[in-house]
Amino acid sequence: MTLGSVSAEHAVPAASGGPRGEEPGFDAAIEAFVRHLDLERGASSHTARAYAGDLTGLAAFARTHGAAEPRDVDLPLLRAWLADLAATGRARTTLARRSAAARAFFAWTTSTGRTPSDPASRLGSPKVDRHLPQVLSVDAARTLVEHAGSLAADGGPAAMRDWVTVELLYATGLRVGELVSVDVDDLELTTRTVRVLGKGRKERVVPFGVPAARAVERWLAAGRPAFVSPGSGPALLLGDRGGRWDQRRARDAVHRLAVGAGVPDLAPHALRHTAATHLLEGGSDLRSVQEVLGHASLATTQRYTHVSAERLRSSYRQAFPRA
């Protein structure tokens, strides 16, 4: 298995030798670290794959500068690595992630005895511009879900699947990956809640409203059965061949509906931002929104207060005579 294909479903086997059974060298250390991310820290397969790629690039750079093993790396080499990446025009977000990958990796190699000290403990990270997330207005969000509902009323099972997708994304603020991972048994229609396994494999229960519940009921009664096959399993959303619906298809559906509804064609993740912003504008407190979204830090949720404040300022400037 290559490092670029690491997934949460396939743990990386440890090699023999070394302080924890690994041979000396970068490759074995990176594979062991990715295994640690998966099994002990519950990182997503996307995070593990990204860190593996970042660290593989670091290893290649280090070898060209005479550092064959993690223990040979020092802070000047790490800074040279980031400077080299910056010189090739890499975005600040990319540099920040690679810096984070290096810090996490060397903190782990130090704690496990693979390096005598942590060369990345003082490695800086470029400041990333914090853009406010784009959100739909209440009217635009209503137009989107009503458009999806009208297509579902006149269309077939695929249109129902699109409808229930946008209804649940907006009603719950789920990530697209979280939504396609939901099973039928994760839904409780009597209480209108859904059980979700989020980042870090942390479970949370999220409420949803009556319109989304209607879409779910319609999908379960007349949409999902049309896609069920012997190997379908418990997935709530099924693809055309009967397997669990792919999140790329779900994103395509949201884009298609947005264009058809005549609303801004934002990324589907914007429905999550929209849900959070509308909750806060409607009077929800930050802690409640944090629970709904599954944020580990309240600071992550607080950015939506800035969105609401900016929308208020914009409205004030447009409406108030002496703005």
Image (tube, rainbow, N blue to C red):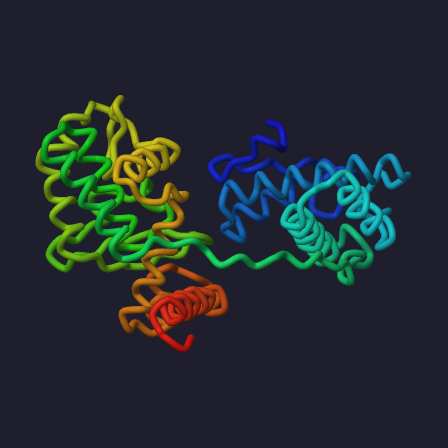
Q: Position of residue 133 (x, y in %)?
A: 46, 56
- Residue sticking out furthest to the front: 321
- Nearer to the camera, 96 or 244: 96
Q: Residue at x 70, y 55 (%)?
A: 103
Q: Residue at x 35, y 36 (%)?
A: 255
Check the image and report above or below for 301 versus 12. Answer: below
Camera sees residue 209:
yes
Which quadrant holds residue 67?
top right
Camera sees residue 235:
no
Q: Residue at x 36, y 46 (%)?
A: 178
How many numbered callouts? Answer: 0
- Nearer to the camera, 136 or 74: 136
Tell me if 125 is positioned left or right of 268 in this view. Answer: right
Quarter holding the N terminus? Answer: top right
Q: Position of residue 161 (x, y in %)?
A: 21, 35
Check the image and report above or below for 11 versus 305. Answer: above
Quarter holding the C terminus? Answer: bottom left
Q: Position of residue 305 (x, y in %)?
A: 42, 69
Tell me if 270 is positioned left or right of 81 in this view. Answer: left
Q: Residue at x 74, y 48 (%)?
A: 19
Tell me if 154 is positioned left or right of 115 in this view. Answer: left
Check the image and report above or below for 232 versus 187. Answer: above
- Residue sticking out furthest to the right: 66
Q: Position of residue 79 (x, y in %)?
A: 82, 51
